[in-house]
């Protein structure tokens, strides 16, 4: 059991260090763990990913908690969650320390002048990608598997008008989207 | 005035509960709870943290939480922030994991999450609209925005590369500007 705890922490520590670019970057690592250790089946893993998607919280954290729980119970889930945030925590604190030390340098301000529009562009491309995926009803952008889903555009137009004017409330937008999805897709 | 540690935990716990449909939703949530309501961060800081979180390994939402917690109350603040973000998902998974396995295949849940994807797109759009004025407001920043957006559409580049390239371009730009002034 101790060995299992150790391996679990080790694998999730690795994911924390190497999974660059958000929760989905952890997926290949999880498939690797599945193959390497057989702690769970591929079907179970698919299920865990699906559940992580519908549970509140960052998807990467959800996957870590769930995989740890399935593999080694509550202690396993605590270890894997702790392990996956450990390295990024150290990295982030280090970056903040360095950043604060050089904050007064004009070069840092110059750099952020370039990073802010880059952030905007990144967000735009994420939004665009999600939009295309939802409208074309496909995960990958191959035209052969595309099914145009006009309902996505209808829901988009219904939601965009009120929510770009009234005081924004993210939870309200999420709830409205969920209800809209159920109504439009079920009938 | 010092921000209370428990307050940091509480706010990130509340944000964690509302984090549905992927980590990017944390940006509008932070904007509402921390920039507008509590003023622990400025809008520029939020954008900067988002940019830096992209190039630090780990879960982006977690990294932004650590940055924001640190800004509010240094080291302990960042620990409170990450604990707050992690706890709701932890509780949900432990308590509901078995139940959720059957829920996932339910078509109604499926449709609800299809709709939530549209919500996430809207939230992203509204966020861009809010941070736009302070981020894209000069010839150089307009150039950066479109240059990066187009490269992201054409090439499958990782965000890390994008952030590093933009930092280099920004340094180059300031060097050229400096020479012009001199």
Image: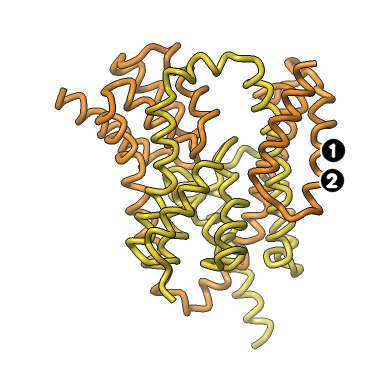
At 72% across and 47% down in the image, what residue appears?
B150
Q: Which residue sits furthest bottom?
A: B182
Q: How is the image coloured?
A: by chain
Q: Give the secondary structure at mark 1.
A: helix
Do we see residue A61 in this rendering? yes
| Displayed quadrant of residue B89 | top left
Q: State the separation of the CA atoms marked 1 and 2.
A: 7 Å
Question: In the image, is A154 to the left or to the right of A111?
Answer: right
Per the rendering, the mark at residue A157 is: 1
Do we see residue B147 in this rendering? no
- Mark 1 neighbour class, 10 Å CA radius: few under 14, some 14 to 19, many 20 or more: few
Residue B108 in picture, x, y percent from top left: 66, 18
Q: Which residue is mark 2?
A: A161
Residue B151 in picture, x, y percent from top left: 68, 46
Q: Give the secondary structure at mark 2.
A: helix
Question: In the image, is A111 to the left or to the right of B140?
Answer: left
Q: Marks 1 and 2: same chain?
A: yes
Kindly indicate which chain is depicted in orange in the rendered structure. Answer: A
| C-beta proximity under 8 Å, tags 1 and 2 | yes
Give the quadrant of the N terminus of chain A: top left
Vertical placement of residue B10 versus B40, above or below: above
At 52% across and 59% down in the image, what residue appears?
B49
């Amino acid at each position: 059991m101790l060995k299992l705890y150790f391996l679990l922490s080790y694998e999730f520590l690795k994911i924390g260090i190497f999974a660059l670019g958000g929760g989905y970057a952890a997926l290949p690592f999880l498939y690797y763990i599945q193959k390497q250790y057989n702690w769970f089946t591929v079907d179970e893993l698919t299920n865990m990913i699906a559940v992580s998607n519908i549970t509140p919280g960052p998807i990467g954290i959800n996957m870590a908690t769930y995989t740890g729980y399935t593999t080694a119970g509550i202690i396993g889930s605590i270890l894997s969650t702790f392990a996956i945030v450990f390295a990024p925590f150290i990295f982030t604190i280090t970056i903040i320390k360095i950043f604060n030390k050089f904050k007064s340098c004009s070069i840092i301000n110059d750099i952020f002048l370039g990073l802010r529009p880059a952030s905007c562009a990144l967000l735009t491309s994420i939004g665009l990608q999600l939009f295309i995926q939802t409208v074309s009803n496909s995960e990958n952008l191959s035209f052969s598997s595309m099914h145009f889903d006009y309902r996505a555009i209808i829901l988009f137009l219904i939601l965009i008008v009120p929510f770009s004017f009234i005081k924004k409330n993210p939870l309200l937008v999420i709830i409205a989207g969920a209800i809209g999805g159920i109504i439009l897709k079920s009938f | 005035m010092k921000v209370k540690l428990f307050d940091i935990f509480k706010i990130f716990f509340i944000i964690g509960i509302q984090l549905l449909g992927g980590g990017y939703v944390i940006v509008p949530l932070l904007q509402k709870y921390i920039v507008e309501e509590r003023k622990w961060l400025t809008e520029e800081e939020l954008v900067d943290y988002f940019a830096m979180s992209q190039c630090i390994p780990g879960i982006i939402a977690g990294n932004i939480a650590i940055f924001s917690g640190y800004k509010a109350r240094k080291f302990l603040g960042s620990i409170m922030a990450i604990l707050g973000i992690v706890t709701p998902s932890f509780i949900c998974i432990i308590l509901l994991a078995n139940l959720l396995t059957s829920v996932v295949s339910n078509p109604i849940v499926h449709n609800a999450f299809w709709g939530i994807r549209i919500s996430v797109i809207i939230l992203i759009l509204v966020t861009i609209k809010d941070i736009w004025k302070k981020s894209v407001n000069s010839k150089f920043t307009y150039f950066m925005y479109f240059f990066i957006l187009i490269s992201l559409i054409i090439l499958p580049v990782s965000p890390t590369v994008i952030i590093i390239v933009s930092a280099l371009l920004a340094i180059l730009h300031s060097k050229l500007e400096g020479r012009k002034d001199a």
